[in-house]
């Protein structure tokens, strides 16, 4: 108590004499505040960098999509269906026969650029893409073959000059001769180690694993 009283008197005397007094702990808060401001600036910089990287990634993806669209436009020509709001789709008619409880597609009518072949036709599982079924269809840009199809027969996609991608499932275990002759830009999308991959390698066709 006496020490506190003496300190108070000393402070009062020094104050009256015009001397400044450093009170312990006064600069500590200022130092902490400076550290916090520095950390805030660092975090803001990190946030800005993360936003920049996200924008770059999104821009790259958007550009990739636009490049693919441009490729399709060049190879397929003017797409009237897309202009009419059909997004490259149109009425599709599949001709087929039934054999041993499975359907074989023997022909196709349609001008869609993107065709997803049905897994069943009138309740019958699609087992084969028949000989010359899609031959010379220059509208085709991408085709997806469903799981369950086992055979793609000779010349099935012969001279489909606009065909870019065809997805072939692992169920396919036989692909006939010259199926993709005349499809200069085609890429086979398939599973690594599948029959389709082996076929692509054997015929020097570009392929991509999914």
Image: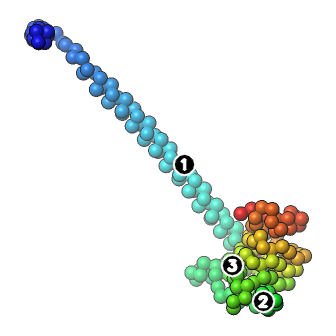
Circle 1 packing at 10 Å, graded few (<14), some (14-19), many (20+), is: few
Distance from the alpha carbon under mark 1 to that under mark 2: 54 Å
Mark 3 to mark 2 CA distance (whole Å):
21 Å
Q: Which residue is mark 1?
A: 53
Q: Nearer the viewer, mark 3 or mark 2?
A: 2
**Residue sitting at x 46%, y 44%:** 47
- Residue 60: x %, y % from top left: 60, 56
Q: Which residue in the structure is indicated by mark 2?
A: 101
Against 162, residue 19 (above or below) is: above
Q: Earlier in the sequence, mark 1 or mark 2?
A: 1
Rendered view: 61 above or below 177: above
Quadrant of the rendered image containing residue 7: top left
Q: Inspect this view and state whether residue 182 appears.
A: no
Label 2 residue SS = loop
Under circle 1, the secondary element is helix
Which colouring convention does the figure follow?
A: rainbow
Find disc 3 in the rendering and name its residue.
116
Q: CA distance from mark 1 to mark 3?
A: 35 Å
């Amino acid at each position: 108590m006496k020490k506190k009283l003496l300190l108070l008197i000393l402070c009062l005397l020094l104050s009256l004499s015009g001397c400044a007094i450093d009170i312990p702990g006064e600069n500590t808060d200022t130092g902490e505040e400076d550290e916090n401001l520095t950390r805030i600036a660092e975090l803001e910089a990190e946030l800005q960098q993360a936003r920049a990287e996200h924008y770059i990634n999104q821009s790259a993806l958007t550009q990739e999509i636009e490049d693919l669209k441009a490729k399709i436009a060049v190879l397929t020509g003017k797409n009237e269906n897309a202009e009419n709001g059909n997004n490259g789709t149109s009425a599709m008619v599949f001709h087929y026969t039934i054999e041993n409880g499975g359907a074989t597609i023997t022909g196709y009518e349609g001008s869609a650029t993107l065709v997803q072949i049905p897994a069943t036709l009138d309740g019958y599982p699609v087992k084969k893409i028949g000989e010359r079924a899609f031959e010379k269809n220059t509208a085709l840009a991408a085709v997806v073959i469903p799981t369950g199809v086992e055979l793609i027969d000779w010349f099935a996609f012969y001279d489909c000059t606009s065909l870019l991608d065809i997805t072939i499932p692992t169920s396919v275990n036989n692909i006939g001769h010259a199926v993709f002759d005349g499809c200069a830009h085609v890429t086979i999308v398939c599973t690594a180690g599948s029959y389709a991959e082996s076929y692509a390698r054997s015929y020097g066709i570009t392929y991509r694993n999914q």
